[in-house]
Image (cartoon, rainbow, N blue to C red):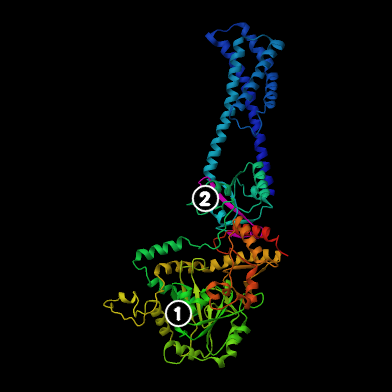
Amino acid sequence: MEKRNEEKAYSGGRQLLLRLLLMVYDIFAVNISYFMALLIRLYVGFRFIELQTGYAAAFRTFAPWYTVCCLLIFSGFKLYNSRWEFAGIRDMNRIVTANALTFLVQVVGTLVFVMRMPVTYYILGAAIQLFLIVASRFAYRLFLLERNRIESQRNARTNAMVIGIGKIGQFARRQLEQDTTLRVVCVVGGKADGGNQYLNGLPIIPGLDKLESVLEKNKIGYVVIANETLPEEEKKRVKTLCEARGVEVQDFIEYLQNNNDVETPVTLKTNSNGARVIPFSPPDITDLEIEEVRRALKSGWITTGPRTKELEKKLAGYCHTSRVVCLSSATAAEELNFRICGIGEGDEVIVPAYTYTASASAAIHCGAQVIFVDSQKDNCEMDYDKVADAITERTKAVVAVDLGGIICDYDKLFAAVERKRGLFRPRQGEDLGARIQQAIGRVLVFADCAHGLGATRNGKMAGEIADFTDFSFHAVKNFTTAEGGAATWRDIPGIDNEEMYHQYQLYSLHGQSKDALAKTKVGAWEYDIVGPWYKCNMTDIMAAIGLKQFERYPGLLERRHQIIRKYDAMCDELGVKHLIHEGPDFCSSGHLYLTRIPGITTDQRQEIIVKLAEMGVSTNVHYKPLPMMTAYKAYGWDIQDFPNAFDYYHNLITLPLHTCLTDEDVDYVIKCYREVVANYVK
């Protein structure tokens, strides 16, 4: 503050000095003008007469009075105003008018109070005075222009500020940084941001409450509004304040809407109603993945190869397991898990009624019979007591679904199957599947962890908890390889992991004893077909995407939880039930955000989904219980036997949750959801 006061005092003193210097100059100019006119009159033709000596005496008598009158007139016409720009017609008019009045003073004053002077004296004096006054002002203007040019070159750029730190705000910042006349010095986030936080080296200002002081402190000359959810009244306040301070403002959202370039990284798509479109779950692909795919394509190795093997090793380390097998889908991974364990015709596999079809269809592909069990009350997890009740001598496996990326309570599930250990009848024989069943000696626990890569429970990673686990890398998943999946397992006493890995390779590559990579060795062309099996391997193109996704994955998970926390606050405020993604002993992968609106019917749920869609917000339902599906009705299943699963489903809406959402997108989803759902909450 003291420094600012010193700067103001210095600036004020400089302006006062400038005015005094101009006045001194004007005193000289108005006197020298008419004195020069007199000299020209006296010495033209080198003649000197006595009458003209009287003219000189008259000039000396009237000069002081004339000087005072000129200064008063010049002041009246603001020729000493510090804000004078000294350029343009208006400024010239003022100077000419002021000089015209001083000319009248000169004529009337000399005629009335002194003596009549020659006409040439008046004309020459007025012309010289006008020239000197105009020249001084415009010379000063040229000086200011040159000084500003030098200062502009020294400072290089005008200080700019971006309001918004989401994807749109960051895109706006990048655009400004390409402008050689502007320099972004700070960005404005939400009130929860700031507190010595930085984004790309720029300080984050928490909110707009202190906008005026921020503009002054940072000497902001250009402001870009790049926060889509900023209320209109707040936008108006920003624009009004900036205009009052002479700060240029650009509404970047409006700019994008009017210049909707498909090559622009941030494109504001709208639906037929003109509403912003929030997609449900687009893949988060960056230049890193694109470049790695390009390298894979140029390498000449695009099927299963070194990149696939590298991804398997990285995932195994991440999941704390000995081996991972990358495949073409999670469904293929679950099916191969069953086949590796020798599960097939005559066996039963227990599956939750509340899940996606892949959880059950993989077992059916193997010839096993699916046994559905109901969910717990107000929970998407299956009822573990009912699991125990469903176990028979034919039961070989239970599939637990880590829905939404939340790991199930495997302690209870393992306790349930342990209680029924006496009913377990392992497959007989010496093949791999029979030996696995005999080694485990109870119903096997499979994790359908399609949603859960990266989730933890009780200090353990998804993948190291169940006996066998499958992951999905589909395009809508947190971690994607476009299509793709993986299988992994816990070490089993007496079973060689390399033997198991080799069997997965056989199942996934036509039963061929060598994959393409192995056949590249010199002379190693020959292979055998040991079984007429399947084709579900992962390619190196897919693995290339996965390798770069893996590098980014910790940040992707953190971003999902940032969004979840915002959704949680909204749902808690509305009284809407939702999945719990974090707790003292667990942390989900944050794949799905399920909300359940109390008191609504399925028809009302559909109304809400349609209204949100009209506002541009895409939603979904996860899931419609399998006993409601035609394929499973054909097996004799009836949703009436699964009341908890239906109750959980009937009022459920899944909100968009993905890492392509900007903060502005999330705020928009919350705004729309709150606006629509508030009318239905009872």
Queried whether the magenta region covers residue 191, the answer comes back as yes
Q: Is residue 43 above or below residue 179?
A: above
Label drawn at residue 205: none
Label drawn at residue 175: 2
Which quarter of the figure has residue 169?
bottom right
Q: Nearer the viewer, residue 560 or 225?
A: 560
Instruction: Indicate the position of residue 81 as horizontal and vertical percent values.
Output: 66, 31
Q: Is residue 424 above or below residue 74?
A: below
Amino acid type for the residue under numbered disc 1: Leu
Instruction: Indicate the position of residue 129 as horizontal and vertical percent values.
Output: 60, 20
Amino acid type for the residue under numbered disc 2: Gln
Instruction: Indicate the position of residue 217 as horizontal and vertical percent values.
Output: 64, 49
Instruction: Indicate the position of residue 579 as horizontal and vertical percent values.
Output: 63, 71
Q: Is residue 403 above or below residue 498?
A: above
Which quarter of the figure has residue 197?
bottom right
Query: Within 10 angstroms of label 1, few (less than 14), some, or many (20 or more) residues?
Result: many
Q: Nearer the viewer, residue 560 or 403?
A: 403
Q: From the viewer's perspective, tell me whether residue 135 is left or right of residue 494.
A: right
Q: Is residue 316 visible?
A: no
Q: Nearer the viewer, residue 497 or 27?
A: 497
Residue at the limit of the structure toward the left, as seen here: 523
Q: Is residue 447 visible?
A: yes
Queried whether the magenta region covers residue 273, the answer comes back as no
Residue at the limit of the structure toward the bottom, as seen here: 422
Which quadrant of the figure contains the C terminus? bottom right
Label drawn at residue 336: 1
> SS of the residue at dot 2?
helix
Q: Image point 26% across, 77% down: which residue?
A: 523
Q: Which residues are magenta?
A: 173-198
> SS of the residue at dot 1?
helix
